Structure formats: structure tokens, C-alpha cells
Image (spheres, rainbow, N blue to C red):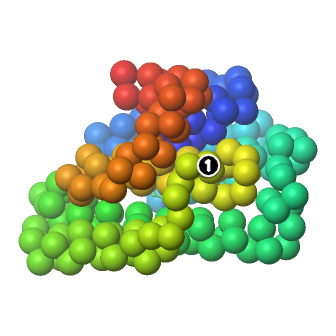
């Protein structure tokens, strides 16, 4: 979803090969040749092959014009804040919390069931969200005054949290709704989920 969304934001033409997770399609010789980790997504651009969703978003963003950034976003402090948001969303909210819930509740047949780990991950998600986002009103974009891949990371994490049954404050629901109203989000949703 993240990569489709970015490609549509940038209006880049692309071809998609709908390989599904845990279907065996990520474990074929031809797929493992381009991504030995056997995970999706993978981007192939001419001869350049890149995996890891966030790295792909950054690559696509770097291919596009830097004029799309505001003064804060191009400053050293702005770049550092970008890294801070990305690390926070990917590590604290995604990997440490939501992915633990997914693994030890929804994918228990593969990773084993652990209600204790799931409960603690849910609490951790709420604690981290409050700690970093409690003072932010989320009436604009997450990083600077322009839309960026940080909005893609944050919206998809909020969507995932909602799907996992975590109750979100109204300001997050309103922010996510605003992001969902973007044409590129809707186009990506259509490609990814239908
Ligand atoms: N670190 C990777 C993780 C990607 C990932 O976990 N992908 C899952 C699907 S959401 C996957 O490919 N699972 C493959 C499988 O289990 O067959 C990234 O951020 O792109």
C-alpha cells in the first residue's frame, strides 16, 4: 500500500506484479532472485532492485523534484526531524508494537500465540503515540508544511492500528480521513486491496 500510494502521488507510471504474502509466491526461485529475504515489496527500476518499503519511498521521493519541499524540510534540522519521525513510526509503532500484535495474534499459526506479548504491545503502542504525538494537533502534515512519505508511513500505521482494534483519538481519525481523501491514496487502495 505504501509504495503504490507514493507512486500515485508522484504520478509515476509502473507495472505491478501482485505477489501475495504467505501464499508461497514470495518463495519462488524467480522472486528470491530479486529479493532473497522473500518479502514484499520489491521495486525494480531498470536494472536497479530495491527492497524495504521505506527505502523504496525515499528512492521514489529522491527521483522527484526537491522543489516540492518547504524551507523546514530542506534544513538540517528538518532532515533530522524526518529521520526522527521515520525511526519512531517504523520502530516504535510498526515493528515493536503493531507487528508483534500481528505476529502473535493474527499469524499465530506461524509465529506462535502470546496473549501477554499482544497485550503489552497494545499498551506500548498507546504509550508511544501519546508520548510523541500527544502535543501535536495533526491538522496539517506530520513533517513540515508539505505532504511527504512520513504522512504515508503515519497514515498506514494508523489504518493498521484501527484494523488491529486499537481505539484512536479523534485527532488521529480526522487526520487519517484527510489523508484518505487524497486521490493517490484512493488509487493505491484500489490497486492494493481489490
Ligand atoms: N521490512 C520489510 C517488511 C515487509 C514485510 O513484512 N512484508 C510482509 C508482508 S506485509 C511479507 O512480505 N511477508 C512475506 C511472506 O511472509 O510471504 C519492509 O518494511 O518492507
Few, some or many residues within 10 Å of mark 1 (<14, 14–19, 20+): some
Tell me where residue 161 sits by quadrant.
bottom left
Please state the horizontal and vertical placement of residue 143, each as a whole percent of the image.
66, 58
User: Which quadrant of the structure image shows residue 75?
Assistant: bottom right
Number of residue marks: 1
Q: Which residue is mark 1?
A: 140
The vertical placement of 1 against 193, above or below, is below
Horizontal relation, residue 156 to residue 73: left or right: left
Q: Is residue 57 above or below residue 109?
A: above
Location of residue 180 with respect to 138 vertically, above or below: above
Give the residue displayed 63% in from the left and 73% down from the top.
Answer: 84
Judge from the rendering whether residue 186 lies leftward or rightward of residue 140; answer left or right: left
Any atom of ligand 1 within 8 Å of the CB at mark 1?
A: no
Q: Quadrant of the C terminus?
A: top left
Camera sees residue 33? no
Q: Nearer the viewer, residue 29 or 62?
A: 62
Judge by depth and name the residue closer to the eye, 163 or 104. Answer: 163
Q: Position of residue 40 (x, y in %)?
A: 47, 47
Say which residue appears at 67% left-offset and 33% top-offset. 9
Q: Residue at 72% across / 33% down in the picture?
A: 10
Whether residue 20 is visible: yes
**Identity of the residue drawn at 77% across and 36% down:** 46
What secondary structure is marked by label 1? loop
Q: Position of residue 38 (x, y in %)?
A: 44, 53
Residue 91 as seen in the image, left or right of residue 14: left
Which is nearer the eye, 141 or 19? 141
Q: Locate residue 175, reporting x and y percent.
A: 48, 46
Amino acid at each position: 500500500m505504501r509504495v503504490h500510494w507514493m507512486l500515485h502521488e508522484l504520478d509515476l507510471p509502473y507495472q505491478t506484479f501482485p505477489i501475495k504474502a504467505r501464499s508461497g509466491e514470495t518463495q519462488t526461485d524467480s522472486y528470491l532472485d530479486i529479493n532473497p529475504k522473500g518479502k514484499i515489496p520489491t521495486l525494480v527500476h531498470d536494472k536497479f532492485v530495491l527492497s524495504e518499503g521505506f527505502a523504496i519511498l525515499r528512492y521514489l521521493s529522491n527521483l522527484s523534484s526537491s522543489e516540492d519541499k518547504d524551507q523546514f524540510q530542506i534544513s538540517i534540522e528538518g532532515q533530522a526531524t524526518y529521520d526522527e519521525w521515520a525511526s519512531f513510526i517504523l520502530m516504535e509503532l510498526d515493528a515493536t508494537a503493531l507487528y508483534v500484535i500481528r505476529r502473535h495474534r493474527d499469524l499465530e499459526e506461524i509465529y506462535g500465540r502470546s496473549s501477554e506479548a499482544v497485550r503489552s504491545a497494545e499498551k506500548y503502542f498507546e504509550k508511544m503515540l501519546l508520548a510523541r504525538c500527544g502535543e501535536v494537533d495533526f491538522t496539517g502534515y506530520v513533517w513540515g508544511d508539505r505532504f511527504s512519505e512520513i504522512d504515508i508511513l503515519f497514515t498506514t500505521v494508523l489504518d493498521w492500528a484501527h484494523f488491529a482494534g486499537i481505539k484512536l483519538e479523534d485527532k488521529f481519525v480526522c487526520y487519517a480521513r484527510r489523508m484518505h481523501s487524497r486521490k493517490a491514496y484512493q488509487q493505491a487502495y484500489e490497486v492494493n486491496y481489490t
